Amino acid sequence: MENESPAGWRMAMLSHVGRVRARNEDFVFCDEALGIAVLADGMGGHAGGNVAARLAVDAWVGRIRKCLVEPLGERDLRVAVADANRVVFAAACADPALRRMGTTLVAACFRRDDTLLTCNVGDSRLYRLRGDVLSCLTRDHSVLRAQCDAGMIESESNGPLALRGLLTRAVGVAACVVADVTISTLQPGDVYLLCSDGLTEMLPNADIAHVLGALGGNPRLAAEHLVDLANDRGGVDNVSVVIVSSNRFGRLGAELG
């Protein structure tokens, strides 16, 4: 799905079940006119993960829509995450089949004053390609990340496989959750990627940067190529992406569009 934004940003989203899982428990949403993008990676087994991801995204978007009369601020994103958490937690408490479900959530708001607001809970990530440099703008809430921060392991890639996917925070597993919120400045030519760990577990940063650099001007093609690559490398989990690029990305993007 792709459209052109009057605010100067183009968005595309894609979610795929992968090659191993029976169900897709990811959920994605973007709206160019509103300048928002959000991705959730559910967990909880049976139907729980899919339900948690969808409920969280719907609640987050619903709250943000109510805040768009004025420029969005940090508090608005925190309230939206709190709403998502409350809805998922209530559903889990009400239905024994959904007990212990939860979800990651990463979201971005592209304001018309060239301000980017982001929020995240869990290990779904937001990346930015600026020039030739790929940066991760979010920090995972995971056991592996905590061990890296404590100096117990050198990097997440060196951590034991048994710890991958073990989260220290998630939406809906407790009555309250704290989201990380950041504010940064947008620049012409930036490309942003929201993704679930089904992508990052399959592709190194160098491959992600290469795809965004080559195809970032056409978010639809970039999204398709990233998901295809993840599946070609095994597709062991659901793979979901939202790509946001400046309309001023460059000649290649214009030609591919």
Image (cartoon, rainbow, N blue to C red):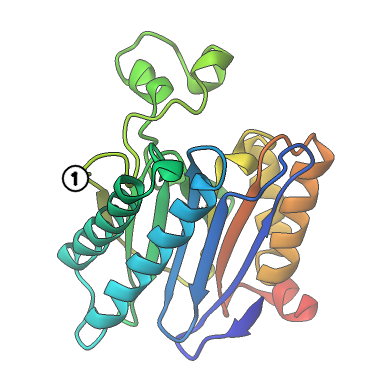
For the C terminus, the image quarter is bottom right
Q: Is residue 191 visible?
A: no
Choose between 239 and 101: the one closer to the eye: 101
Task: Name the residue at 33% across, 77% down.
Answer: 111
Left or right position of 210 against 169: right
Q: Please, is residue 237 above or below residue 23 in the view?
A: above
Q: Check the image and name the residue furthest to the bottom.
A: 6
Task: Name the residue at 33% across, 58% down.
Answer: 118
For the N terminus, the image quarter is bottom right
Q: Position of residue 252 (x, y in %)?
A: 74, 72
Kind of residue at disc 1: Cys
Q: Is residue 17 visible?
A: yes
Q: Check the image and name the residue furthest to the left.
A: 75
- Secondary structure at badge 1 equals loop
Task: Name the residue at 66% across, 69% down.
Answer: 219
Q: Check the image and name the residue furthest to the right.
A: 232
Q: Position of residue 132 (x, y in %)?
A: 59, 51
Q: Position of residue 133 (x, y in %)?
A: 54, 48
Q: Please, is residue 123 above or below residue 78 in the view?
A: above
How many neighbours does mark 1 have within 10 angstroms: few (below 14), some (14-19), or many (20 or more)? Answer: some
Left or right position of 120 against 39: left
Q: Position of residue 254 (x, y in %)?
A: 72, 80
Residue that mark 1 sits on? 176
Left or right position of 52 against 211: left
Left or right position of 43 against 182: right
Q: Please, is residue 6 above or below residue 32 in the view?
A: below
Task: Name the residue at 57% across, 62% down.
Answer: 242
Number of marks in picture: 1
